[in-house]
Image (spheres, rainbow, N blue to C red):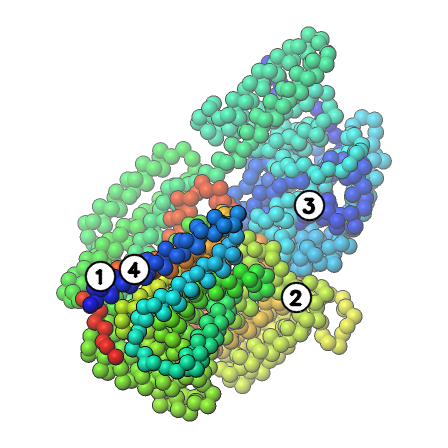
């Protein structure tokens, strides 16, 4: 009897049209914007034969995973974001495949992601590339031009239209831009056309259905990917003459899941529900049918869900959803018996309603327990990766004392352990474990599916690292037994700055365990750099006012020896500056401030405060994170269309300031190139309509600004090339360190120019403040305070991290500025687009790292190992949080926020590690040159 | 001599701690609906006023630095005015630092300023009582090994503890627990208060522990 029930019922609709409007947010249809710009749709929602819902999309709210969710009813994993860039065919069971097998003819126009996902599924298609985000009209015209012809034809059953224009407008100008209204109106007209045509086609047999939905919404900044309210709530409309006319007061649309659409459409089209579907039927859409049919539909859905549960959980019988379903099935059987007996009274109807309710409850529990366990983790591969990372971190930590010594040597003692017995034993043991795990594991495992040679290579790497760690520990303990008092001196010479640095690093790493600290990580960095600035201020005060006291050996012990020396100098120094916050007495201070004279000293004292003020201003430029992201910030104010002239003025001033701050270090040719390049940046922004020239008040037609952008690229390449030439010259021909530092500075200014081109105009002040703070720090803080290379590296790293967030980035995918990847490109080209987007996103940390290299290589005369120390510290600072974060999220993999908070952060960390690796290669290249030179001199 | 002084320090510090506890408890008897969290701003005012009154009284009674020579009445007045100006300036400075740390500039100005006043009460007021409006002495006390009596050591410890308490108090603000004490500036001011109380208790103990190493030179 049961098997008979699972036979597919006939379709409910003849033709179905799905109109997917990319990035359609719920308030664009149901809110005031919808009322204003979408009159036809609003009328349908309020009075027409339609059902409206709000569909909740699961993060990541990116197009491709959302299309998968719409068509399979399952929840795609996070890895799909990365695959989003080049989508392979969808292999899972899905609606399109089912429709094709059932002989339905499908036509598709729109985003070519569909064509890639479902190759050879469509009878006719025209794909539009979705990557060129600065195009607002052509992408949609490309779809609409086929519409009239397609609507006239009779030879299709399913028509899918995917409109991209709204998403592009969102990415470029945000949800409140004046461009959104006309676009919505355009969409409204298209819906009207389709609806009228569908109505005119209707015959007696079966009604037609029009489905309007969005794949995801958009955040307040206009992008998407995260889990904010604007991004996850999309409207969902079912319009068909089969439905009852809406009457009565309009209520708030009901909330459904996006995954529910797949099963509803499957039933509507008379297709089997796809295998991995976790969604529930949206019952009102099928509500017009008889009770018997309705019960049959929900039973189909429940049957599919419980089968999926059986496949995925061994203990499925204990699942409450499964139990509910079984009881509902039983009462369904009773109901059928009564029904077949011809009992047709009110009681039967009421009983049917009860059964229906039972079914719905069962469906809900089933799909919630299914969505919880879609995530399956490949624990073995995860463990292997984690072990390698932890071993590398340990090796780095053990070699800290040696690497930071004056020779700056960092060597992994690999050769002796490579021939030891331990190494071979470990290899054998790991291989045995590998064989056992891979033969016993039932589920798919990435590491097991690799070739044997690679696997053995990985095993050897793990054991070699292990032996390396052991021998390094042995060496360290051997060394430390000889001079016992060494650690005492080490700890006593710690200054407050060291304490802050250590506490900050540890605190930041610990904070990664809490999801809200990850969401608000920018707060952590702002807090840390503020504290750092205050400590620097204190250090500067001490340095200026108590000059001779800071002798570490003496200050550790409170003994009389200190008093006699300390006392005299101390008072001499205090008396002069403290009395008046110095105007007239500047002349006298020269005696005490021997390292700096006159005004420099006061600038140096004021600079931490200026830096603090800069940071405060930057903080209110871009409000990022989750909790306070909705707060109005200066960036929004600037980007709104009423403030175009203010934005233009700010951009012009910023570009001028950038030129002023950068030009000091460059040669004349680079100066001219820089000036022309910055002019090019402004004209590029004017061409794409972000800023205006003062002489053109009427809005010119917006172009893609390709010529202007390429004009700037020429100068960027020119400057970087000159710099590289200098670097190569200093490396190969002459051992001239000044040539090297000018070369480095030129490369740096080339990168600044590139960043100026890629940053949105309202973010240009970030670049200005970055340069300003770097200049001030170099000149007035680090030179006088004489920090060692390790401290300076860590401070640079902190500022780099803070600037990452000052730029408006966050740990959610939504804030990645995809439009940076299309600056100066005619169409989507994968490698440059990825490179440009990565550069624009990580510009802050990158610029600080290159600046660090510039600074350290200019310090080489003072400390020959500076660059080596810097590189080592940079690696250490990056690997500590990454390694610990990986361990943390392995532990937290069943956390509720694993996909919405922890995974995006992991993605960011991963990309950052790649960039750091590139930076460190550059560092070592510079350092190699230096050590080479030293050897030559010997 | 030294033991007795430490005991005196302990007594005064315990008195201060007791006063702070009283400010949290006593007003609820007189005023319905008073809680430290609910009517936080009122509590901030009460606490600042009580702590400063207590400190001034203690200073007048105990005179821990008796070495000052007798001065004229006009000198005393000018000294007092100077103290007031310094206190006000320190409030402004703390306010500025808090805003630089990210507190909103315009909205909740009252909250921020009252928090700055509380911090000033815990730090600057103590310095003013102990050292007078004499910045040289302040710099001396707050540089390494600058303390010259157990009172000054205690001052160092309580000041650092209050500021550290406020610093740590900012940590829970980004957490999404939606607790009443996460509202600005409650966690910070509570942190500062607990830090101050901890400092008051730690100071005599620490001095007692390290009394061998602490050899204050006399002026
Ligand atoms: Zn999309
Ligand atoms: Zn998009």
Dot 4 falls on which chain?
B
Tag 2 residue: A638
Q: Which residue is mark 3?
A: A26
- Residue A213 - label: none
Q: Secondary structure at mark 4?
A: helix
In the depicted view, which residue is nearer to us: B36 or A659?
B36
Residue at the limit of the structure toward the front, as seen here: B73
Point out the tag, 1 or 4, that comes first from the N-terminus. Answer: 4
The residue singled out by tag 1 in the image is B209
Q: Give the residue displayed 52% in from the left and 71% down from the top.
A: A614
Marks 2, 3 in one chain: yes
Q: Is residue A460 above or below residue A123?
A: below
Q: Is residue A101 visible?
A: no
Contact (CB < 8 A) between labels 1 and 4?
no
Neighbourhood count class around disc 1 (C-alpha, 10 Å): few under 14, some 14–19, many 20 upward? few
Q: Position of residue A357 (x, y in %)?
A: 63, 23
The quarter of the picture where the N terminus of chain A appears is top right
| In this view, A446 is above or below A561 | above
For label 3, the SS is helix
Q: CA distance from mark 2 to mark 3?
A: 26 Å
For the point 61% across and 47% down, the residue is: A229
Name the subunit of mark 2.
Answer: A
* CA–CA distance in space, label 1 to label 2: 59 Å
Is A288 above or below relative to B132?
Answer: above
Image mark for residue B11? 4
Disc 1 to disc 3, C-alpha distance: 66 Å
């Amino acid at each position: 009897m049961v098997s008979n029930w699972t036979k597919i019922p006939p379709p409910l609709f003849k033709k179905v049209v799905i109109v997917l409007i990319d990035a359609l947010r719920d308030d664009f249809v149901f809110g005031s914007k919808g009322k204003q710009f979408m009159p036809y749709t609003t009328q349908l929602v309020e009075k027409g034969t339609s059902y409206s819902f709000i569909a909740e999309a699961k993060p990541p709210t990116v197009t491709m995973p959302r299309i998968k969710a719409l068509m399979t009813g399952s929840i795609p994993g996070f890895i799909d974001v990365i695959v989003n860039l080049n989508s392979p065919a969808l292999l899972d069971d899905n609606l399109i495949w089912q429709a094709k097998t059932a002989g339905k003819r499908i036509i598709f126009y729109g985003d070519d992601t569909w064509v890639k996902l479902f190759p050879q599924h469509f009878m006719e298609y025209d794909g539009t590339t979705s990557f060129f985000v600065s195009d607002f009209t052509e992408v949609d015209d490309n779809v609409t031009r086929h519409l009239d012809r397609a609507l006239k034809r009779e030879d299709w059953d399913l028509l899918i239209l995917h409109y991209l224009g709204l998403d592009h407008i969102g990415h470029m100008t945000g949800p409140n831009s004046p461009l959104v209204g006309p676009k919505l109106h355009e969409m409204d007209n298209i819906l009207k056309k389709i609806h009228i045509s569908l109505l005119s086609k209707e015959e007696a047999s079966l009604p037609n259905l029009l489905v309007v939905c969005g794949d995801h919404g958009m955040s307040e900044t206009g992008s998407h990917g995260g889990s904010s309210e604007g991004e996850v709530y999309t409207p969902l409309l079912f319009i068909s003459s089969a439905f009852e006319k809406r009457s009565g007061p309009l209520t708030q649309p009901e909330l459904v899941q996006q995954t529910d659409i797949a099963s509803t459409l499957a039933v509507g089209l008379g297709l089997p529900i796809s295998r991995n579907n976790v969604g529930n039927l949206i019952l009102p859409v099928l509500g017009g049918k008889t009770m018997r049919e309705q019960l049959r539909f929900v039973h189909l859905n429940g049957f599919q869900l419980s089968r999926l549960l059986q496949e995925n959980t061994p203990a499925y019988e204990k699942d409450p959803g499964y139990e509910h379903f079984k009881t509902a099935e039983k009462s369904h059987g009773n109901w059928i018996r009564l029904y077949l007996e011809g009992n047709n009274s009110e009681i039967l109807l009421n009983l049917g309603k009860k059964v229906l309710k039972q079914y719905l409850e069962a469906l809900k529990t089933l799909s919630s327990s299914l969505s919880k366990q879609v995530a399956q983790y490949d624990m073995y591969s995860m463990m292997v990766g984690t072990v390698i990372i932890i071993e590398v971190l340990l090796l780095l930590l053990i070699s800290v004392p040696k690497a930071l010594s004056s020779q700056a040597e960092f060597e992994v003692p690999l050769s002796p352990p490579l021939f030891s017995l331990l190494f071979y034993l470990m290899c054998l043991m790991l291989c045995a474990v590998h064989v056992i795990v891979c033969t016993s594991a039932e589920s798919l495992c990435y590491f097991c599916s690799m070739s044997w040679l690679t696997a053995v290579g990985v095993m050897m790497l793990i054991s070699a690292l292990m032996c390396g760690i052991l021998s390094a520990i042995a060496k360290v303990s051997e060394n430390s037994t000889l001079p016992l008092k060494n650690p005492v001196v080490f700890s006593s010479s710690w200054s407050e700055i060291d304490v802050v640095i250590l506490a900050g690093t540890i605190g930041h790493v610990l904070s990664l365990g809490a999801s809200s600290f990850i969401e608000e990580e920018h707060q952590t960095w702002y807090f840390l750099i503020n504290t750092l600035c205050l400590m620097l201020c204190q250090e500067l005060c001490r340095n200026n006012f108590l000059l001779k006291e800071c002798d570490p050996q003496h200050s550790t012990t409170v003994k009389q020896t200190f008093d006699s020396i300390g006392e005299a100098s101390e008072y001499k120094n205090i008396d002069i500056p403290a009395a008046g916050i110095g105007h007239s007495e500047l002349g006298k201070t020269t005696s005490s401030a021997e390292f700096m004279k006159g005004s420099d000293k006061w600038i140096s004292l004021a600079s931490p405060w200026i830096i603090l003020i800069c940071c405060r201003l930057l903080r209110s430029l871009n409000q990022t994170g989750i909790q306070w992201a909705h707060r109005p910030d200066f960036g929004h104010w600037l980007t709104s269309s009423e403030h175009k002239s203010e934005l233009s003025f700010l951009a012009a001033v910023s570009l001028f300031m950038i030129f002023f701050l950068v030009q000091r270090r460059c040669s004349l040719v680079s100066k001219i190139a820089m000036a022309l390049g910055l002019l090019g940046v402004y004209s590029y922004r004017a061409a794409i309509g972000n800023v205006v020239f003062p002489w053109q008040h009427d809005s010119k037609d917006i172009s893609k600004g390709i010529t202007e952008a390429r004009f700037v690229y020429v100068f960027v390449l020119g400057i970087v090339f000159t710099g590289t030439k200098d670097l190569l010259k200093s490396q190969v021909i002459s051992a001239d360190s000044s040539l090297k530092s000018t070369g480095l500075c030129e490369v740096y200014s080339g990168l600044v120019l590139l960043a100026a081109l890629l940053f949105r105009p309202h973010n240009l002040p970030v670049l200005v403040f970055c340069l300003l703070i770097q200049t001030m720090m170099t000149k007035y803080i680090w030179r006088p305070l004489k920090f060692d290379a390790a401290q300076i590296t860590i401070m640079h790293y902190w500022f780099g991290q803070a600037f990452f967030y000052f730029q408006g980035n966050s740990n959610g995918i939504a804030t990645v500025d995809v439009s940076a990847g299309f600056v100066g490109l005619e169409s989507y080209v994968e490698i440059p687009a990825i490179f440009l987007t990565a550069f624009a996103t990580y510009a802050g940390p990158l610029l600080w790292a290159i600046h660090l290299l510039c600074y350290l290589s200019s310090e080489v005369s003072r400390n020959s190992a500076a660059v080596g120390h810097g590189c080592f510290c940079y690696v250490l600072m990056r690997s500590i949080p990454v390694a610990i974060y990986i361990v943390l999220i392995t532990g937290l993999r069943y956390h509720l926020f694993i996909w919405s908070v922890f995974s995006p952060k992991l993605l960011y960390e991963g990309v950052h590690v790649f960039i750091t690796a590139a930076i460190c290669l550059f560092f070592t290249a510079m350092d190699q040159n230096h050590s080479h030179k030293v050897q030559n001199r010997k | 001599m030294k033991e007795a002084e430490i005991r005196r320090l302990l007594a005064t510090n315990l008195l201060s701690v007791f006063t702070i506890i009283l400010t949290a408890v006593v007003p609820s008897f007189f005023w319905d609906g008073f809680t430290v969290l609910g009517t936080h701003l009122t509590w901030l005012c009460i606490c600042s006023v009580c702590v400063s009154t207590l400190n001034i009284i203690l200073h007048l009674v105990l005179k821990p630095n008796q070495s000052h020579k007798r001065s004229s009445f006009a000198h005393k007045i000018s000294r007092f005015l100077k103290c007031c100006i310094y206190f006000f300036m320190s409030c402004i400075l703390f306010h500025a630092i808090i805003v630089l740390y990210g507190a909103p500039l315009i909205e909740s100005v009252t909250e921020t300023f009252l928090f700055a006043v509380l911090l000033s009460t815990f730090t600057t007021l103590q310095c003013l009582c102990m050292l007078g409006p004499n910045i040289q002495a302040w710099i001396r006390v707050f540089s390494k090994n600058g303390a010259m009596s157990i009172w000054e050591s205690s001052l160092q410890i309580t000041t650092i503890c209050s500021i550290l308490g406020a610093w740590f108090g900012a940590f829970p603000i980004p957490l999404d627990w939606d607790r009443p004490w996460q509202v600005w500036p409650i966690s910070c001011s509570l942190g500062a208060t607990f830090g101050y109380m901890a400092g008051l208790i730690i100071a005599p103990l620490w001095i007692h522990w390290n009394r061998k190493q602490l050899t204050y030179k006399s002026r």
